[in-house]
Image: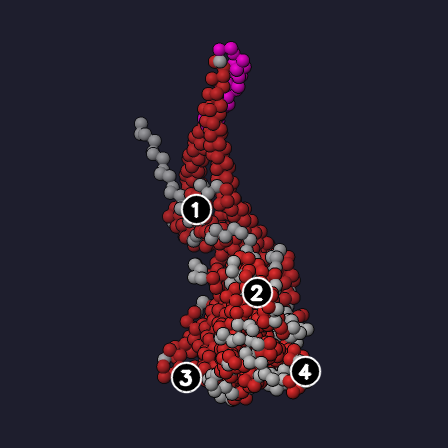
Amino acid sequence: MESPPPPPPLVTLPKMNDLTTKQHNIDEIIGFLDQNLKTKQDLFIESTQFLISSSLTKQCSQIQSYLLNRITKRTVSWISRSFKANSSFHQLTLSLQNLSLLTSPHGVGSKRFRWVLSDELPRLAKELNRVESVRSYLETAVQLEASVGDLEDAALYVMACHTGNMFSSKLSVSSISDDNARKHDKLLQAIKSMNDIEQVLVVIVKFHSQWLCLLRSVDVRVDKILAALRPKVFADHRALLASLGWPPKLLQSENGSEQITDLPNPLVLMLEDKRRNYSQSFIALCALQHLQDKREERQNNNLKKSEKRNLRLWSIDELVSPISSRMEYHFGKWTEQPEYMFALTYKVTRGFITGVDDVLQPIIDKAGLISCSAKEAWVYAMVQVLSGFLEKKVIALLAERYNAKHLKSDVLSSWLHLVDLIIAFDKKMQCLVNLDTCFLVESGNFEGPSRGMSVLSIFCDRHDWLKIWAKLEFKNAWTKLNTELKEEKMWVVSGTCKSGIDTDQEHLLSTTEDLKAPPIADFFLKVIWEMIERCQTMPSLLPRAQFIRSAAGRFIWYFFKILLLRFKATELSPHNFDDGSIVRACGLINASRYISIKLQEWSDAVDFLEMKIAENDSSKKKLDDRMDSDCFFDEEIRSLSEMETNWLVEIIAVILRQFEILSWEYVQNKYSFEEDQDYSNLGASRDSIDLVVSNDFVEALDALKSWLNIVKKNLNKKDFLDLWRSIAEGLDHYISSSISTSEIRFSKIGINQFDADMQALIFIFQPYCARPHAFFPCINEILKLLKLKEEEANIIKGLLSSEESGRKCLHLRGIRHLSVNQVLQVLRYRN
């Protein structure tokens, strides 16, 4: 008897493990059918004997048995761990029941209780913690496996749908609608699964950092699915846009009509079915972008809520992308006429912005995308199109020409003209975004999140181009200023300036009239501010600060050098002192003060405070105290203040030195105060005679009064206040030191003459304050000592032999500024 024929070999199953390539799976299935059903005879045999079906059923049964066996082993392992935990709980119960042994008179229970507390309880807690961790890990792994499985199923369905047939006119409307609905549901299911997975992964990152392998394995699987799903979703969305008639034509007629706003907008003309399909596709794409942003934030360890708004929307980018290819065709013909590029971009943006806002903003609101604006996303995308072309085809070419020495001179006008166009374009685009509040743009206000929609963002990532721009702006500003520097009238203080000291106004005024600044200072600040304003729409703080430092900051230091050179050219000298030199010096001091006040006002503005903070944050280490300052122009202001102080001190020194020269004979003439002159012919006692100022002192007083009047007329109030007080202090010190060291013997008439001279000196300062005597303390004390009676003078001399009692004695008599030696010197030479 023959043995039965052996069973046919099992049919090899097709490999269906790769989700990333849909075509590969289809090829595997087709190959499997071609291999087993080569002819019609094979198909007939299969329909009658079911060889392939039985083989597949048997293999599926084997796989199911294998999976059941693995699950059983895992379950048994888990049960064994549960038994161990149960045993630990049982031992704990027994230990707790033996706590009654604590009352044992032999102390056996006490030792056991301590052993339970020190050994058993910590070991049990550790074991429970480990079991809980394992349980949590398994639950999380099972949850993630289920979510990833749901994601794979939904993604496979979405990728299996053919995009080409979805919008075919040959298919019935009902079949297209049903297919779209099922596909959209599956896509939303896939996105929901990815959101669920992402929430679990965020929890893992925050609280279970040791589960890194689980995190990576899930990320790898999800990334593979996204890599296959995202292009499919984009392809479907583009096919839908094409079926709507997007993109429209850029020009309505051959002559390039200006009426671009009258172009038919396919978004507005959509029918109900297509509007619904587009809305679903738009929301799905937004949801996918939101998911991608969350994944990137987690993977970059940036789980904190970001305050920066993302103006970009994938759905809007898909609208702009086909338009940009058509626009770039025209841009290529206008590389030497960039104004046409800006005009075309603005017209296209303005032409469709109303339809974009009316149609897409409700969809965005429905999708729950908080703080997202369709208008801003549309304008942002159009700006990026223009910025990308300018960066590659225009600015790059200008930079190459600038680096070539023989072409450098031609770049200045082209580059600055391009920047002018960019600034005007940014204002127009800002106006499109703020259609209801357009007046903000006219005032130059670019605050808000839409400030990032600027073509100047090109320079944020290209520091070499930023430096070129700053150099060209500096050169242009220097050309403007250089023509004004040669005009001498620009350095002359206006005759309409207020003069004198206004004691009722203690606040600091900052106008050119009140500070008596020459016109060149105001012109210089206007040039500086124009440079600063040209970078106001640059979205990044640090590049903006770098531009201001390189252009405006460098320009400020160059102007400081000019001020220094002009002050040196004044040639102030006590031997050759003329009114013109002191007037020019006062004008330079006024210019310095006016510029420093304006720089401080600018530094107090929010924009400059933010830029200073950005600079401090970018510095790894602080070099000195100036880095701690919140003032943007701190170094410039300190330099101006130092120059202003030095120049003021120089003027004070010249005035004091010339006063010393003119009063030298008066101070050194020992006999002018010693001799008693004959006043008998006047018929009055010597004590009641009104003496006139000494002849040797008149010229010095007259010169001092003249200088103060000139300085008062030409110097600003604050610096003049410091000047005359410093001069008064210097004169007080000079005269008191001269009197105490010149060994002059004062007669009674001499004392009266000295008193009259000093009153004349102090009277010169009467217009500047109510009590000028307070600024001559040493002279007042010398006069007080000279007028003492002989008995009081002798008492003071005796008390001054002891340093401590002498100082007290002087203080009691109001002598606080003269030293003990000076007091003794004055008392010694009084007659």
The quarter in which the N terminus is drawn is top left
Q: Which residue is mark 4?
A: 684
- Residue 556, position in %: x, y? 49, 76
- Residue 176, position in %: x, y? 58, 58
Q: Which residue is mark 2?
A: 794
Identity, as a three-letter code, of the amino acid under mark 2: Asn
Q: Mark 4 or mark 1: name the one nearer the start of the chain.
A: 1
Choose mark 3 or mark 2, whichever is in front. 2
Q: Mark 4 or mark 3: name the one nearer the start of the chain.
A: 3
Q: Which residue is mark 3?
A: 409
Residue at the front extreme? 680
Q: Nearer the viewer, residue 227 or 766?
A: 766
Q: Residues within 10 Å of mark 4 (few under 14, many from 20)?
A: few
Is there a contact, CB below 8 Å, between mark 4 and mark 1? no
Q: Mark 3 or mark 2: name the one nearer the start of the chain.
A: 3
Q: Residues within 10 Å of mark 1 (few under 14, many from 20)?
A: few
Secondary structure found at label 3: helix
The answer to whether 328 is drawn above or below residue 189 in the figure is below
Left or right of 543 in this view: 691:
right
Identity, as a three-letter code, of the amino acid under mark 4: Ala
Residues in magenta, as a range: 80-106
Q: Estimate the spatial distance between the alpha carbons at disc 4 and disc 3, rounded to whole Å.
A: 88 Å
Q: Estimate the spatial distance between the alpha carbons at disc 3 and disc 2, rounded to whole Å.
A: 86 Å
Identity, as a three-letter code, of the amino acid under mark 1: Arg
Q: Estimate the spatial distance between the alpha carbons at disc 2 and disc 1, rounded to whole Å.
A: 100 Å
Q: Which residue is mark 1?
A: 216
Is there a contact, CB below 8 Å, between mark 2 and mark 1? no
Q: Say whether residue 670 is visible.
A: yes
Q: Nearer the viewer, residue 37 or 735?
A: 735
Identity, as a three-letter code, of the amino acid under mark 3: Ser
Name the disc covering residue 756, or none: none
Q: Residues within 10 Å of mark 3 (few under 14, many from 20)?
A: few
